[in-house]
Image (cartoon, helix red, strand yellow):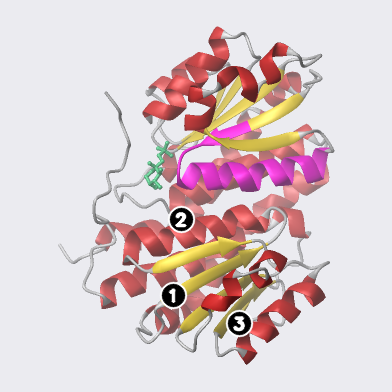
């Protein structure tokens, strides 16, 4: 079988998994509404690697949309330090734990949920792609997006499916019915992006003059920048790093050379500040790639509110990493030294 066949299939078919995620949330609407009737002191999102980065993005989005306190932690941190993570029981109300895991069997995530339940921290909501795994079985409520399952180690359609589920779940929590319906526009928009920007993804992916990538994103886009950074590491063994936009000036920009790519996940409201960072990096010799609703290297033209369309930043960046992996003679289906699930004995 040709190198990277699974990854290619999973990236370019992913909008089916996006639609499945929307169906699963719709099917669990009543249970989600009942869950969010509760007042929580905090909503704690956890995951590992890709799903930790998803947690960063989901927590920022949840807090922005619901105005409830939300944060993200690596699952390993909750496992090792459960009591400080829920403030040693000092919170006036329970914590909602949102555990995110493609496999549902990553040891740190399972152990973290066990530790949280042992402390009677509060209810557990699972977002996962596999139904018959420990996480789905331990959760009080599990959103299982089976069409996000994948054979490749590096997460692509699984991540996007779980991110859409997190976005939709957040809109339920925020009682935004009209915007929930609007999410159904995402799968065709994703199809169009993959079709229209496949050549650009390939062109940037196959440019081996670029030897380092920096992904910049602010707000909920920072977690997505982290994920794009990880795809590039896992699939292509390239030095990459993510930063909040304005943070890049405070030291890391010293690394910029004329073989550096700087990828900006632009917002709407703060674009003027973000673009200024990118212009400064271009003056330092960087090659700049922008993704935004409009007037960018990759323009979504979605007509959707910014908080609903975060998933649109992913497909082209996943495809770029895929093409770079192939041109480097690597196999994106089997990244070096990695397994699909980290199981500790
Ligand atoms: C998460 C994970 C990531 C890693 C890679 C494989 O597993 O191990 O840490 O980046 O993408 O998946 P999961 O808990 O989401 O199944």
Disc with the residue nearer the chain's start (1 vs 2)? 2
Q: Quadrant of the C terminus?
A: top left
Q: Residue at x 35, y 74 (%)?
A: 323
Q: Residue at x 81, y 20 (%)?
A: 39
State the residue position of label 3. 297
Is 47 magenta? The answer is yes
Q: Position of residue 72 (x, y in %)?
A: 63, 38
Q: Residue at x 69, y 53 (%)?
A: 220
SS label for mark 3: loop
State the residue position of label 2. 14
Disc with the residue nearer the chain's start (1 vs 3)? 1
- In space, the residues marked 1 and 2 are separated at their CA atoms by 27 Å
Say the numbered circle drawn on residue 304.
none
Q: Position of residue 277 (x, y in %)?
A: 70, 77
State the residue position of label 1. 212
The extreme left residue here reads 1
Occupied quadrant, residue 130: top left
Q: Position of residue 303 (x, y in %)?
A: 76, 67
Pointers 1 and 3 in contact (C-beta within 8 Å) = no
Highlighted range, magenta: 45-66
Does any portion of residue 105 appear in the rendered image? no
Name the foreground residue: 250 vs 94: 250
Quadrant field for ligand 1: top left
Does any portion of residue 251 appear in the rendered image? yes
Name the foreground residue: 147 vs 222: 222
- In space, the residues marked 1 and 3 are separated at their CA atoms by 19 Å
Name the foreground residue: 302 vs 209: 209
- Of badges 1 and 2, nearer the viewer stands 1
- In space, the residues marked 3 and 2 are separated at their CA atoms by 22 Å
- Of badges 3 and 2, nearer the viewer stands 3
């Amino acid at each position: 079988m040709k190198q990277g066949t699974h990854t290619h299939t999973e990236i370019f078919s992913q909008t089916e998994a996006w639609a499945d995620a929307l169906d699963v949330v719709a099917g669990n609407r009543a249970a989600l509404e009942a869950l969010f009737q509760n007042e929580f002191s905090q909503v704690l999102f956890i995951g590992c690697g890709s799903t930790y980065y998803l947690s960063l993005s989901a927590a920022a989005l949840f807090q922005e949309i619901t105005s409830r306190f939300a944060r993200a932690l690596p699952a390993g941190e909750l496992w090792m330090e459960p009591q400080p993570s829920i403030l040693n029981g000092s919170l006036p109300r329970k914590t909602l734990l949102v555990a995110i895991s493609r496999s549902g069997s990553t040891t740190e995530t399972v152990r973290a949920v066990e530790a949280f339940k042992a402390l009677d921290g509060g209810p557990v909501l699972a977002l996962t792609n596999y139904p018959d795994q420990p996480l789905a079985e331990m959760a009080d409520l599990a959103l299982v997006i089976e069409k996000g399952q994948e054979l490749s180690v590096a997460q692509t359609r699984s991540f996007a499916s779980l991110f859409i589920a997190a976005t939709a779940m957040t809109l339920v929590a925020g009682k935004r019915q009209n915007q929930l319906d609007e999410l159904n526009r995402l799968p065709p928009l994703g199809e169009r992006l993959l079709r229209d920007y496949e050549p650009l993804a390939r062109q940037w992916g196959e440019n081996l003059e670029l030897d380092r990538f920096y992904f910049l994103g602010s707000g909920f886009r920072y977690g997505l920048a982290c994920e794009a950074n990880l795809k590039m590491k896992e699939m292509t063994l390239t030095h990459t790093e993510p930063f909040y936009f304005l943070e890049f000036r405070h030291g890391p920009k010293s690394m910029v050379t004329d073989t550096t790519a700087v990828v900006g996940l632009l917002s709407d409201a703060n674009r003027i500040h973000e673009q200024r960072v990118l212009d400064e990096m271009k003056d330092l010799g960087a090659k700049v790639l922008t993704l935004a609703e409009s007037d960018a290297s990759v323009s979504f033209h979605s007509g959707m509110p910014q908080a609903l369309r975060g998933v649109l930043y992913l497909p082209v960046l996943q495809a770029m990493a895929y093409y770079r992996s192939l041109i480097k003679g690597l196999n994106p289906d089997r990244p070096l030294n990695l397994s699909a699930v980290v199981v500790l004995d």
